C-alpha cells in the first residue's frame, strides 16, 4: 500500500537533485534479537526492489552506531530516508544530537524525503506518547508540538481506555494525531500544509472534540 507513496516521495526528491536511493534505518528495532533485525533488513530490501532502486539498510542499532561516519555518508543526499518500526523511545534516544541525525536533518532540509513508519513516525515529533507509562518522553523534535499515535484504528480497538486517557492528558498547544493503518500524513515542504494519503483517516485528537480527515484533505495545525 505504501509503495506508491514511497515512490512518489523518492521521485520528488530526485527532481530536487537527490540520489535515487532508498536508505532504511531499522534503529527503532535495535534492541530486538538478531532474527528480528534481519527481518527488518529483509523488509527494507524487498521494498527497495518494489521501488526498483538501490537500497541501503543501515546496521544502525545503538547510539554509538549513530556516530559512524560511514552511516553519515550513506545518508547524504539520499532520495528517501526511512525510519522503520520498533521502539520509538530507543530510536529517539539513539539518534538525538548525533552526526547521523544531523545528516538526516541536513538532507531533509535540502530536498531529501523523510518518512517514518509506526515508531519512526512517533519519534519525529517533539514528544513521544507512552501507553505503558503515565508520561511522555522527548522525541527528535523535527515536528514541533506533535505527538503521534500510529495504527490508530487498531489501537482504539485494543486499548480504548489508554487512548482516551492519552487524549485527556494532552497539553494545551500540543497536537495529538491518530493515523489509521495504511494511511499517511504528508507534506511537500516545510511551508506546505499536511495532506492525508491512503485508505484510512488522520484524526486530530482533543479532549473537547475529535476531527477526522480523509485522503486528499488538508490539515493545518495551530
Image: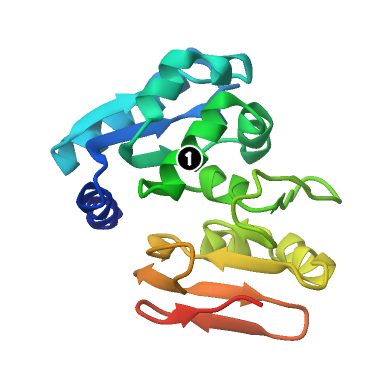
Q: Check the image and tell me how it is coloured.
A: rainbow
Whether residue 21 sits left or right of residue 68 in the image: it is left
Up-down: is 64 above or below 155? above
Q: Residue 51 or 108: which is nearer the viewer? A: 108
The residue positioned farthest toward the left in the image shown: 52
Whether residue 134 sits left or right of residue 5 in the image: it is right
Residue 46 % position (x, y): 23, 33
Asked which secondary structure carries label 1, the reply is helix
One can see residue 57 in this view = yes
Q: Which residue is mark 1?
A: 106
The residue depicted at 24 percent of the width and 45 percent of the height is: 17
Residue 121 % position (x, y): 53, 50
Residue 112 % position (x, y): 36, 46
Quadrant of res 192: bottom left
Residue 181 % position (x, y): 44, 60
Q: Residue 171 or 205: which is nearer the viewer? A: 171
Quadrant of res 98: top right
Amino acid at each position: 500500500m505504501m509503495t506508491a507513496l514511497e515512490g512518489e516521495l523518492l521521485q520528488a526528491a530526485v527532481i530536487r537533485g537527490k540520489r535515487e536511493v532508498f536508505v532504511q534505518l531499522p534503529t527503532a528495532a535495535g534492541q530486538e534479537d538478531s532474527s528480528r533485525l534481519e527481518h527488518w533488513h529483509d523488509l527494507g530490501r524487498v521494498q527497495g526492489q518494489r521501488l526498483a532502486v538501490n537500497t541501503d539498510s543501515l546496521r544502525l542499532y545503538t547510539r554509538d552506531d549513530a556516530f559512524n561516519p560511514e552511516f553519515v555518508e550513506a545518508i547524504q543526499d539520499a532520495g528517501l530516508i526511512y525510519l522503520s518500526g520498533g521502539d520509538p523511545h530507543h530510536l529517539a534516544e539513539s539518534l538525538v544530537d548525533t552526526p547521523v541525525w544531523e545528516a538526516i536533518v541536513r538532507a531533509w532540509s535540502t530536498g531529501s524525503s523523510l518518512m517514518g513508519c509506526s515508531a519512526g513516525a512517533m519519534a519525529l515529533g517533539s514528544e513521544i506518547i507512552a501507553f505503558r507509562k503515565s508520561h511522555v518522553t522527548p522525541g527528535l523534535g523535527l515536528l514541533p508540538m506533535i505527538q503521534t499515535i500510529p495504527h490508530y484504528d487498531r489501537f482504539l480497538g485494543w486499548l480504548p481506555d489508554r487512548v482516551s486517557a492519552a487524549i485527556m492528558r494532552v497539553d494545551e498547544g500540543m497536537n495529538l494525531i491518530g493515523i489509521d493503518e495504511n494511511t499517511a500524513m504528508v507534506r511537500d515542504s516545510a511551508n506546505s500544509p499536511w495532506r492525508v494519503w491512503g485508505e484510512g483517516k488522520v484524526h486530530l485528537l482533543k479532549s473537547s472534540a475529535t476531527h477526522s480527515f480523509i485522503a486528499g484533505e488538508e490539515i493545518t495545525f495551530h
